[in-house]
Image: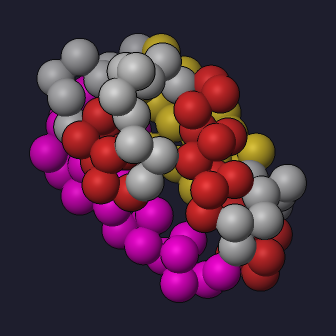
Amino acid sequence: MTEYEFDLSDCYSPEDVHRAIAERLPLPEYYGGNMDALYDVLTEPRAKWRLTFTGCATASAVVGGMYMRQLKKMCERATAENSELEVIFIDN
């Protein structure tokens, strides 16, 4: 399993969140930079990854609590569909 860590404490918008993800995660050229596109990538069989999101409390305050809750829910659905995926959210 390949591990990736994303510090969301410097994100100020949903676009910043996806930019932070795209900078570290090996995404296909066609990645659309949105929640649906991320779900598609995370549920592909080849995605044997552990993703750790840090700075989530800061991101919730700045990017928006609703957006961060949607991101968490989407990741929960993705991990339910892809048993090779683990996603961790840390509120530091």
Relative to the observer, which residue lies in front, 65 or 79?
Answer: 65
Q: Position of residue 82 (x, y in %)?
A: 19, 37
Query: Could you tell whether 41 is left or right of 92 in the image?
Result: left
Which of the 4 quarters of the picture holds residue 59?
bottom right
Is residue 90 visible in this depiction of the protein? Answer: no
Residue 38, position in %: x, y? 37, 44
Q: Is residue 26 left or right of residue 46?
A: right
Q: Is residue 18 left or right of residue 61?
A: left
Q: Quadrant of the C terminus?
A: bottom right
Q: Is residue 40 above or below residue 34?
A: above
Q: Observer-nearest residue: 77 or 39?
A: 39
Residue at point 70%, 73% (across, down): 63
Left or right of 32 on screen, residue 20: right
- Residue drawn at x 30%, y 23% as measured from the top left: 47
Q: Is residue 73 in view?
A: yes
Q: Is residue 84 magenta?
A: yes
Q: Which range of residues does the magenta coloring cover?
A: 64-86
Is residue 75 located in the magenta-colored stretch of the structure?
yes
Q: Which residue sits at x=62%, y=25%?
A: 24
Relative to 4, residue 76 above or below? below
**Looking at the image, which residue is at 19% across and 29% down?**
44
Please state the horizontal and vertical placement of residue 21, each as a whole percent of the image.
59, 38
Near-viewer residue (39 or 75): 39
Q: Residue furthest right?
A: 10
- Majority secondary structure of magenta residues: helix
Total residue callouts = 0
Image coordinates for residue 42, horizontal then vertical, percent: 31, 37
To which quarter of the image does residue 41 belong?
Answer: top left
The answer to whether residue 38 is above or below residue 35 is above
